[in-house]
Image: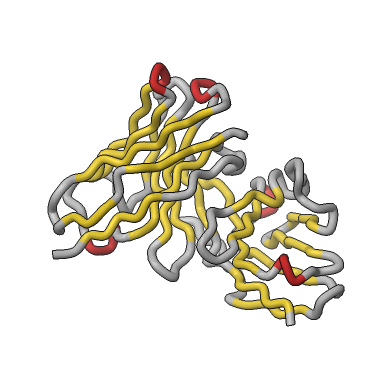
Amino acid sequence: SYELAQPPSVSVSPGQTASITCSGFKLGDRYASWYQQRPGQSPVLVIHQDTKRPSGIPERFSGSNSGNTATLTISGTQATDEADYFCQAWDRSMAVFGGGTKLTVL
Amino acid sequence: EVQLLESGGGLVQPGKSLRLSCAASRFSFSNYSVNWVRQAPGKGLEWVSFISSSGTYKYYADSVKGRFTISRDNSKNSLYLQMNSLRAEDTAVYFCATGSVDDAFDIWGQGTMLTVSS
């Protein structure tokens, strides 16, 4: 079965850039999506189709996807960005999520 | 504001059955494919099942195939998940979320908690 791997945790200082990676076999050949989940809340879509931001998502969120790795980049990270982030892709009509990355804003 | 609202969770014994519901409001539900996604306590997200807008196509995770059945009633703007032969490992918050194959999950409900325990 297809798998997506994420680092369990990433730390960043306020105002700095955070990068969260998601690795999977030939992931660049599929669309990658990213979700933000704050404690006790439902996930929120922040990036879809590799690079697109839904309406209402701040410009500091961006995405890329090439080769075996998709990356979520948060520029000028704010304290409110502290959350769990999950990548997701589809494989043969089955959706797959990465294990999630806890972003800590120190 | 568009909304999905899940219901039907609770405490159920192993081996028993339960049906979850998801009610859609303020958008054209019949035009959207919908999914169930679950999250065990303290764990990550796990996709469970997909149903196309008309109900023609249905897909399941291997972990629930043969035990869970997804369905929808577009006249009632509702999505369902019939869960049979429940196991302790099915314990999770169950979310419904719109999204097509090869696309993202863009509208999420608030989730309903299922606990499978004797």
Q: Residue at x 76, y 49 (%)?
A: A57
Quarter of the image for the N terminus of chain B: give it. top right
Provide residue A37's location: percent of width, then percent of height.
59, 60
Residue A78 falls in which quadrant of the image?
A: bottom right
Q: Residue at x 72, y 66 (%)?
A: A80
Residue A85 falls in which quadrant of the image?
A: bottom right
Its colouring scheme is secondary structure
Q: Residue at x 80, y 53 (%)?
A: A58
Left or right: where B26 falls relative to B112: right
**Position above or below: B61 against A18:** above
Please identify the residue farthest to the front as the structure is shown.
B1
**Position above or below: A32 against A86:** above
Quarter of the image for the C terminus of chain B: give it. bottom left
Res A76 seen here: yes
Provide residue B81's location: percent of width, then percent of height.
32, 39
Residue A38 falls in which quadrant of the image?
A: bottom right
Left or right: where B55 falls relative to A102: left
Q: How many marks do you count on the picture?
A: 0
Provide residue B77's location: percent of width, then percent of height.
43, 24
Nearer to me, A26 or B75 = B75
Q: Residue at x 64, y 49 (%)?
A: A45
Please identify the residue farthest to the top as the structure is shown.
B75
Left or right: where B51 falls relative to A106: left
Res B66 seen here: no
Nearer to me, B11 or B116 = B11
**Position above or below: A99 against B98:** below
